[in-house]
Each structure stands twice: as C-alpha cells, then as structure tokens.
Image (spheres, rainbow, N blue to C red):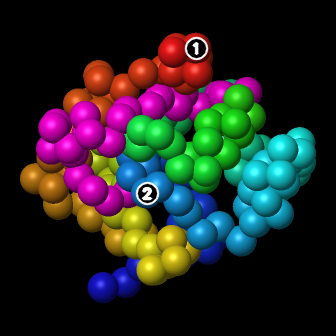
Amino acid sequence: MDLLTGDDFTDLFRTFEHTAFRLETRAAYGIPEEDEPFQRFLRGEEPPSDWLRPWLDLITEQTRQGKRVERVRLIDEPPSDYLRFEVWSTPLNLQAGEDIRYLPRRRALELQLPKYDYWLFDSRRLAMMHFDHAGRFQGAEIVEDPRTVVQHAYWRDTAWHYATPYQAFVES
C-alpha cells in the first residue's frame, strides 16, 4: 500500500474544493514540532504558537476562500495530558477558521465510530491516516471507493451530530 506523505499529503489541503473533515481518535500524537510546546504546557508555561503557524496559515488561506475545515476529536474522561494540550491550542485553530468539536470516546464507541483517524475531502476522497507505535504519522492511504467513502461520510455526519462545539465543551 502506498502512503501519501510530506508535500503530497499537504496538497490535499490546498486542492480540496469545499469541505475537509477529520476524525481524531488517538489519545496522543507523536508530532516532533509539538514536543517543546507540550512540555511547556505541562509545566504551566505559556506555549508559543509559532510551532503551529504553517498549519494555521494553510487553513486560513482555505477558509478565506469559503472552504470548510471541520474536526471531531474523541476525548477521554478524564482527558489525557495531550488532549488537554489540544483543547488549550484549539482557539488558534478556530481563529484560522476551523470548526472543532469534541465527542466523549465512550459515546463514539456506542455510535460504532471507527477507532482510527481519517480525513474526508469533499465527501469523495478519503485519507486513512497511519501512525507508528509512538503515534507518529506515517502517511495517508487514499481511498476513493464509493462504498468506503460513503461509510466514512456517514460516520462524519454521526460524529458531527453528537459532538459538542468547542465553546460549549470548555464551558461544561
């Protein structure tokens, strides 16, 4: 199986036409650029936001064109340190135009959502994300089989329906 990585993967975010949706299922991700900000967060220090700048710039460019970028993050109760870090950094994503919502993992299991991460672009191109044992992104498997894509669109719609918007989540 060929996996899309690097600029080829990033191009998915430059070339989608209308919508990009992500289901995030992991309790932690091994993203090297996040190591220092995450450690600072754990120490109670204010993490810098420059580590996220390339992503934020890319998403801002897309959302200014009227495209939608949405995520549902599965969250443990209580959340892991990494998930608390993600919640802390979410306002940066929101400022770039993303819409991020939260769904308790137990509810996702009840809804029979998949236990793996994926991006769905324009309801027709699926990028199933692969990670190593340490949570480092290895690449995305591109799937365009209509039955598989429709199933993931159903899961997207279900997750979105039951997930809580960021502001309501942090206020609860």
Q: Which residues are magenta?
A: 94-117
- Quadrant in the rendering for residue 167: top right
Q: Residue at left 15%, top 56%?
A: 148
Q: In the picture shown, does residue 26 fall above or below 3?
A: above
Q: Residue at left 23%, top 52%?
A: 114
Residue 168 covered by magenta stretch = no
- Quadrant in the rendering for residue 72: top left
Helix, strand or loop status at disc 1:
helix
Helix, strand or loop status at disc 2:
loop
**Count of all numbered marks drawn on residues in the image:** 2
- Identify the residue under disc 1: 171
- Identify the residue under disc 2: 26
Q: Nearer the viewer, mark 1 or mark 2?
A: 1
Q: Residue at left 58%, top 21%?
A: 170
- Is residue 11 shown left or right of residue 89? left
Indicate the quadrant containing the N terminus: top left, top right, bottom left or bottom right: bottom left
Residue 106 in view in this figure: yes
In the image, residue 115 lies at what x, y percent?
Answer: 27, 56
In the image, residue 15 lies at what x, y percent?
Answer: 54, 51
In the image, residue 56 lies at what x, y percent?
Answer: 74, 43
Residue 154 in view in this figure: no
Type of the residue with mark 1: Glu
Q: Which mark is residue 52?
A: none
Residue toward you, 75 or 61? 75
Residue toward you, 104 or 68? 104
Q: In the picture shown, does residue 169 fall above or below 102?
A: above
In the current view of this chain or complex, which residue is farthest to the left? 147
Q: CA distance from mark 1 to mark 2?
A: 23 Å
Q: Earlier in the sequence, mark 1 or mark 2?
A: 2
Q: Are dots 1 and 2 in contact, CB under 8 Å? A: no
Residue toward you, 138 or 80? 80
